[in-house]
Image: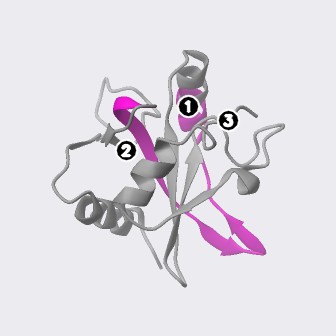
Amino acid sequence: MLSESDLRRWLKDAWNGSHMDWIEPAIGGTVGYPDVILALESKLIPGSIPVELKVAELKPGWMFRVRPSQIRWHEMNHRAGKRSAFLIGLTEPFVLALLPGFCWPGKPNCDWRKRLSWVYDKPSIVQTLGSKVFWRPL
């Protein structure tokens, strides 16, 4: 079974020395803030992007859970005109998908499964996050 720690290790290895900031919960910290800030070399997103790591569960289909504090953070970030994303891992076989931070399971008018972009390494993550198609409005 894949864990979020496994996803962290994979991302750290895949990012291969490029800048990333890991966020750890602490007293006084922002509740719901994503797990990592990834530096990007993209015209669409200069600088960096907050990314929440999630592990999907196999059910009759597959699903991942987003806590209310994380939904609140991503929604406020989106309303402020900023971008964020979810990086979702699934085992058996190991696959990864990106989802814009303004779309998650249970959000009205957002078919999150149709918004997924499958990725497999750093270049595909950077390319996806730098794509206008990925960020198209709901």
The amino acid type, in three-letter code, at marker 3 is: Arg
Give the crowd class for mark 2: few <14, some 14-19, many >=20 residues within 10 Å.
some
Where's the C terminus, which quadrant? top right
The Cα atoms of the two marked residues, 2 and 3, are separated by 24 Å
Colour pattern of the rendering: one colour
The Cα atoms of the two marked residues, 1 and 2, are separated by 12 Å
The amino acid type, in three-letter code, at marker 1 is: His
Q: Give the mark nearest the N terminus, 2 or 3.
A: 2
Quick one: SS at disc 1?
helix
Mark 2 in CB contact with mark 3 (< 8 angstroms): no
Does 32 appear above or below 7?
A: above
Residue numbers of the magenta segment: 45-73
Q: Position of residue 101 (x, y in %)?
A: 57, 38
Quick one: SS at disc 3?
loop
Mark 1 in CB contact with mark 2 (< 8 angstroms): no
The residue at the point 61 percent across, 44 percent down is: 134
Q: Which residue is mark 3?
A: 136
Looking at the image, which residue sits at the far left?
17
Does 30 appear above or below 8?
A: above
The nearer-to-camera label among 2 and 3 is: 3
Give the crowd class for mark 3: few <14, some 14-19, many >=20 residues within 10 Å.
few
What numbered label is drawn on residue 35? 2
The amino acid type, in three-letter code, at marker 2 is: Asp
Q: Which residue is mark 1?
A: 74
